[in-house]
């Protein structure tokens, strides 16, 4: 329950961060996707049914705030969670440096999914060049920021572990 | 069977989430989802946080901008600098109040030129993803906002309301690739559609090669889309390219309003022909 509250608060904090403070950064219209980093963290360190639904809800919250069509980010984040979970089951991915690479790959998976869904549901001129730019920028930013977010989440988790009394 | 489900419960629940997302996507695209309670609840939770966050971000932005102008004072002595900084903080507060006052006065003046019932709102959040250009307003259906209303400022058009909850509204900005505004070239009265583009900023679409469009031409709303009142400034033509082939010319537009710099807006319903009569 405490972990659920931690990730719920982290999710809300990251959404507010993405919708307000990150627009102060001088990097144009690209927003660092920390929600994606959180989904990757859940996929790597919390393989559970709750985490799967959590990833879906994180994507859905982005849809509620930003997307003209609901379900875009919910689908992408669920897919990212599933991909990371399946990879983490078969390959050792828990080294801090490797986690950055995992986030980069996850961001590329998300980008490819977004491109696919855009192509199916929304028809836009000059889409491909712009999409490629956004995918690469978002993936690089997410990978750079991933170690920091992972470290903060791990600290929060350790703090909660200390609060929980040990079993007799 | 039960053991299989238990062993693969994460995989199965992830697949369920994927299918659920696909269902939501399809249902929204078909317009079958009108009011969904989760979104309203989430916006209700996020609204005060976003207001506080945006307030702090605006303060930081103002402070940062102002700090840049103070760079010249660095060579002065420490005492004087501290004194200046104290005064600057106070001055910044007053400047902010004065600027807000001026903006609201402009909005009031502009409001009298618009159809009756214009609603003043503040932007409390911007888009959380690079793929869509949108923002969130601090007013919703409880304040009279409806889907499809135009969002404008005295400088020009900002966008269109696409989703409304009780106390918030989501605005699709003019610069989003999914937006489309029916416009007239003010000088020649030629018609076209202004829309965002992922590739080259904001563009004027469907402008025939034979039409006379020049750099510097101002684009205004035609009023024919029944969303935007007629005659509002949308943007200025910055680049015109006529290729050897094709029916249309390629026109790039500089939007009249840079949404990132706007804090207050007016939300207005276009005057329909029936209402005019």
Image: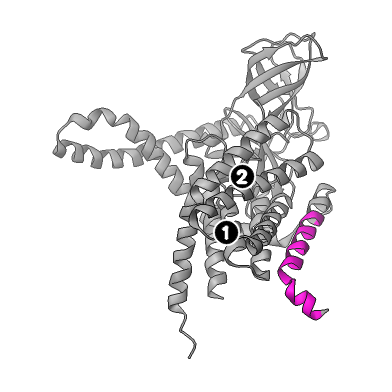
**B14 falls in the magenta region:** yes
Q: Residue at x 78, y 79 (%)?
A: B3
Q: Nearer the viewer, residue B18 or B57?
A: B18
Tell me the distance, in whole angstroms, between the alpha carbons under discs 1 and 2.
Answer: 27 Å
Quarter the C terminus of chain B occupies: top right
Element type at mark 2: loop
Foreground of the two, A95 or A128:
A95
Q: Please indicate whether residue B109 sits to the left or right of residue B9 in the image.
A: left
* Rendered-image quadrant of the N terminus of chain B: bottom right
Residue A20 seen anywhere in this rendered image of the structure: no
Mark 1 touches mark 2? (CB < 8 Å):
no
Q: Residue at point 74% right, 51% down?
A: A70
Q: How many marks?
A: 2
> In the image, what residue occupies the spot 78% across and 9% down?
B244
B27 displayed left or right of A150: right
Residue B172 is drawn in which quadrant?
top right
Give the percent coordinates (x, y) of residue A36: 60, 53
Residue named by callout 2: B129
Q: Position of residue B248 (x, y in %)?
A: 79, 16
> In the rendered view, would you say B26 is above or below A131?
below
Q: Is residue A123 visible?
A: yes
Q: Which residue is mark 1?
A: A93
Q: Are marks 1 and 2 on the same chain?
A: no
Element assignment for label 1: loop
Residue B196 painted magenta: no
Classified by dominant secondary structure, the portion drawn in magenta counts as helix
Closer mark to the observer between disc 1 and disc 2: 1
Q: Which residues are magenta?
A: B2-23
Question: Can you give x and y, in whole percent of width and height, for residue B241 in the image?
Answer: 70, 12
Q: Going 47% across and 80% down the picture, which residue do you hit? A: A164
Above or below residue B240? Residue B11 is: below
In the image, residue A14 lies at what x, y percent?
A: 53, 55
């Amino acid at each position: 329950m405490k972990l659920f509250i931690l990730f719920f608060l982290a999710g809300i904090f990251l959404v507010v961060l993405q919708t307000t403070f990150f627009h102060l950064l001088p990097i144009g219209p690209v927003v660092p996707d920390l929600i994606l980093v959180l989904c990757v963290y859940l996929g790597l360190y919390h393989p559970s049914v709750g985490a799967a639904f959590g990833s879906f809800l994180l994507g859905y919250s982005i849809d509620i705030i930003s997307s003209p069509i609901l379900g875009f980010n919910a689908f992408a984040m669920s897919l990212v969670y599933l991909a990371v979970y399946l990879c983490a089951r078969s390959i050792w991915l828990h080294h801090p440096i490797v986690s950055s690479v995992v986030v980069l790959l996850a961001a590329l998976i998300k980008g490819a999914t977004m491109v696919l869904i855009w192509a199916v549901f929304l028809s836009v001129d000059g889409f491909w060049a712009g999409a490629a730019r956004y995918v690469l920028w978002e993936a690089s930013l997410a990978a750079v920021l991933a170690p920091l977010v992972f470290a903060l989440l791990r600290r929060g988790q350790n703090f909660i572990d200390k609060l929980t009394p040990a079993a007799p | 069977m039960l053991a299989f489900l238990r062993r693969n419960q994460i995989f199965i629940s992830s697949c369920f989430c994927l299918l659920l997302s696909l269902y939501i996507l399809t249902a929204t695209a078909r317009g079958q989802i009108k009011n969904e309670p989760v979104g309203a609840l989430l916006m209700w939770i996020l609204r005060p946080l976003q207001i506080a966050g945006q307030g702090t971000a605006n303060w930081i932005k103002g402070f940062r901008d102002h700090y840049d102008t103070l760079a010249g004072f660095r060579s002065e002595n420490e005492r004087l600098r501290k004194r200046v900084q104290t005064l600057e903080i106070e001055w910044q507060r007053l400047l902010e109040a004065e600027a807000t006052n001026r903006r609201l006065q402009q909005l009031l003046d502009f409001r009298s030129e618009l159809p009756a019932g214009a609603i003043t709102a503040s932007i409390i959040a911007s888009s959380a993803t690079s793929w869509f250009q949108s923002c969130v307003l601090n007013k919703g259906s409880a304040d009279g906002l409806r889907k499809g209303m135009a969002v404008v400022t005295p400088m020009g058009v900002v966008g269109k309301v696409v989703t409304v909850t009780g106390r918030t509204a989501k605005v699709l900005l003019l610069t989003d690739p999914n937006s489309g505004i029916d416009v007239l070239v003010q000088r020649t009265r030629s018609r076209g559609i202004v829309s965002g583009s992922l590739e080259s900023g904001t563009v004027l679409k469907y402008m025939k090669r034979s039409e006379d469009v020049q750099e510097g031409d101002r684009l205004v709303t035609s009023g024919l889309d029944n969303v935007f009142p007629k005659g509002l400034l949308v943007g200025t033509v910055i680049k015109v390219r006529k290729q050897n082939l094709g029916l249309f010319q390629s026109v790039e537009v500089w939007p009249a309003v840079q949404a990132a710099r706007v804090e207050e807006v007016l939300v207005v319903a276009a005057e329909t022909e029936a209402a005019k009569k």
